[in-house]
Image: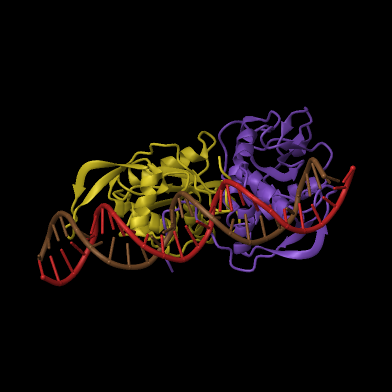
Chain colours: A yellow, B purple, C brown, D red
Amino acid sequence: MSRATQRPRGAVSIDLVLCAIQADRLQVLVTKTAGGDSVLPFAWNRPDIVPEQAARQLATALIGRSPAWLTAAPVAAFKRHPAGADLSVPFVAVTGPQAQTVVGAAWHPLDALPVLAPRHKAIAQSALETLMLHMDTAPVAFRLLAPTFTLSDLQRAYELLLGRRLHKASFRRALQAAYLIEPTDEWRGEGRGRPAQLFRYAPRKRRVVHRGVRFDLIGH
Amino acid sequence: MSRATQRPRGAVSIDLVLCAIQADRLQVLVTKTAGGDSVLPFAWNRPDIVPEQAARQLATALIGRSPAWLTAAPVAAFKRHPAGADLSVPFVAVTGPQAQTVVGAAWHPLDALPVLAPRHKAIAQSALETLMLHMDTAPVAFRLLAPTFTLSDLQRAYELLLGRRLHKASFRRALQAAYLIEPTDEWRGEGRGRPAQLFRYAPRKRRVVHRGVRFDLIGH
DNA sequence: GAAATAGTGTCTCTTAGACACTATTTC
DNA sequence: GAAATAGTGTCTAAGAGACACTATTTC
């Protein structure tokens, strides 16, 4: 084992859950150790850069470009880290569908991950929860898509994040009311069926936060 | 400065935002350093216990009993920590209204905090966001109350968390539909006005998660 | 009585979700 | 033509929020 990957004392690791839509499923990038075990990509915390920057660099090294969205997740220090870190600082990142990956890394469906060390398993399992927590206030679904996308693409992204099917007509109505997208002049034909118009993310209003607990709100 | 509070190398601190409703406002417990500066309560990370346990012990030491609810928040390592920690692991805790506090600690309204070090200021400001993120899936509002409470108490707790007024009749309708509470035989008169019935938190069903983005959901 | 707080019944207007279409492509 | 996907108009049942009350206390 090289010196660079040796575990420091009181080591803090930056662990990354990098998500993308691949083959119509939400997938996570998993790497392999020298020993052949599956692990989430991670880096050791360094005093010279902030953890978020380390996570961003790690993601960039993996997919050849900056992740489209990235956020810190709550610390998970229970259970064992595959490389023995005492503390894990988990980050969840999102990228578009066309990302290339570095050798040794492979996408795995979030609901069918390979066997991971206990802590990485816990971090990966809570990643979807983190995405769901932010999808109302950040354009998480849009960052899973290419810059232009069809409404069916977008609906599928929301369905994967929410874990349930959405109603087409109603989805589009709500989308229109939210002023989040604008049409382009392009259309995309997939072969079968009518070609779909392409849209881009272009929020026109301050994003309206539709709160969760729907205890009726008073006016104003 | 004592050896115990000396900053270790590569130090990781556990920073606590302890929230309670005091004087009809959401307030945070703030302590003072030996130098007289206001700081959020914190402890140095220890290898023998998990950060969550350290946060729980810290909260217990401050209010004389275990916090009613506690969760990890995303790491904040940007900006300067008041005691020089390189990395902060923030926790947000909630307690009922009758909590006593240790000497040197005082409650301050979340929207009118004293001057804090940059990192603590950022952590405190994101605490409300953390509470809001969890209030749909965890009984955060209930943990801010005594074991039995009036419906007006509960509505006020939700109003403080949401940052806006709620409609009384509608709030109670939604509450009934959620099967989260049950009435007790007790009533509480505050002096003025009709006495209010006391309720307790007693979720009868699996908590229904009302999602935020209301892109119309399909049946089933 | 007035003032204050607790608690309810009804009405209306919005909208989520269902349903039923039409439109445009490939085969 | 059939099959597949894109996109829309209408209907209905549910419910958010408004309004207007009644009920019970202190003064």
List x then y, in percent, for residue B214: 45, 53
Is residue B15 shown left or right of residue A70? right
- Name which quarter of the figure residue D27 lies in: top right
Q: Is residue A19 visible?
A: yes
Is the residue A17 above or below the residue B77 in the image?
A: below
Is residue B6 shown left or right of residue A197? right
- Name which quarter of the figure residue B10 lies in: top right
Instruction: Please tell me which residue is depicted at 39% across the width and 54% down the height of the picture.
Output: A158
Q: Which residue is at the front of the view, B129 or A47?
A: B129
Is residue A6 shown left or right of residue B2? left
Q: Which residue is at the front of the view, B160 or A43?
A: B160
Instruction: Please tell me which residue is depicted at 42% across the width and 66% down the height of the picture.
Output: B219
Instruction: Please tell me which residue is depicted at 61% across the width and 42% down the height of the picture.
Output: B164
Is residue B143 shown left or right of residue A14? right
Q: Which residue is at the front of the view, B196 or A53?
A: B196
Q: Tag count in the figure?
A: 0
List x then y, in percent, for residue B193: 80, 49
Q: Is residue A106 visible?
A: no
List x then y, in percent, for residue A108: 38, 60
List x then y, in percent, for residue A165: 39, 62
Image quarter of the C terminus of chain A = top right
